[in-house]
Image: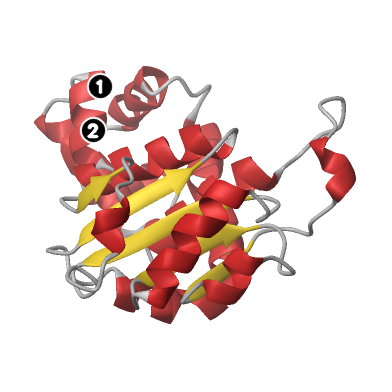
Amino acid sequence: MNIVHLSEKYELNDLELQIVAYMKEHIEELKSIGIRQMAKDNYTSTSTIYKLCNKFGFEGYSDMIYHLTSTKDTSNDFKHRYHEYQAQFSHLLEDKQKRIVVFGLGFSAPIAEYMQQRLTLLNYQSMCVVHMEMFSQIFNQDTILIVISYSGKTPRLNEIVETAHQNHVSIISFIGNQDSPIFKYSTLPILIGQYDSFSHDLNRSNTFFGETIIAFETLLFP
């Protein structure tokens, strides 16, 4: 729950900010806190809280609490799913002075751009532009490569990853195919879903790219 964002978006007053901060602080037990209890704890009336619910676009108090707690529960489900990658992912990204190159081709390109912008907003030095010189041994301690690839079989991407690997650059991959060179060369290969060569058919659904963003967001905020 980003209080600053909510404050700017909904133009919250001081009391409303106090209530939002209260909900964030008590998120674990929010389901058991009734509207009267919340009003009492914040020295206000139930009508004030109802007005806040309406300002957020909820039909009522129960609707707001359900939204907040169900979002949290879903987040925990994803944290459990990607738990095995968490420690190494956090370790690789702990130094914000390192340059992070995020790269993907085709449908992976906009995913890479999303990750790059997200990292930039979190004060990482990130970019989507690839120059092979970045992966030379001169910069291997200062660079991290993040790649996104469903098949892991794109020649250009394989070349970049292999060069980075040979020069001991840390590589994080969000990959759908564990039988690919990218999976093999990655420092941390994060397997997303199960690879199906038939899913390249545009008339079939492919959840890889959506799940990749979910995995990235989940690992970014342990």
Residue of label 1: 9
Q: Is residue 19 above or below residue 146?
A: above
**Mark 2 residue crowding within 10 angstroms, few (<14) / some (14–19) / many (20+):** few
Q: Position of residue 115 (x, y in %)?
A: 38, 44
| CA distance separating discs 1 and 2 | 6 Å
Q: Quadrant of residue 74?
A: bottom right
Residue picked out by circle 2 = 5
Identified by mark 1, the residue type is: Lys
Foreground residue among 101 and 220? 101
Q: Please determine whether, in this image, residue 120 is positioned above or below residue 109.
A: below
**Residue placed at 61% from the left, 63% from the top?**
77
Q: Secondary structure at mark 1?
A: helix
Q: Is residue 15 left or right of residue 28?
A: left
* Residue 99 vs residue 154, the one in the foreground: 154
Badge 1, how many Cα within 10 Å: few under 14, some, many 20+?
few
Three-letter residue code for mark 2: His
Residue at left offset 65%, top offset 56%:
152
- Quadrant location of the C terminus in the rendered image: bottom left
Q: Residue at x 85, y 48 (%)?
A: 197
Q: Are marks 1 and 2 in contact (CB under 8 Å)?
A: yes
Callout 2: SS: helix
Is 170 drawn above or below residue 148 in the view shown?
A: below
Residue 1: in sight, yes or no? Answer: no
- Work out whether 69 lies above or below 135: above
Image-based side of 86 in relation to 97, left or right:
right
Residue shown at 41% from the left, 80% from the top = 87
Confirm whether residue 169 shows in the render: yes
Between 65 and 178, the residue placed more toward the observer is: 178
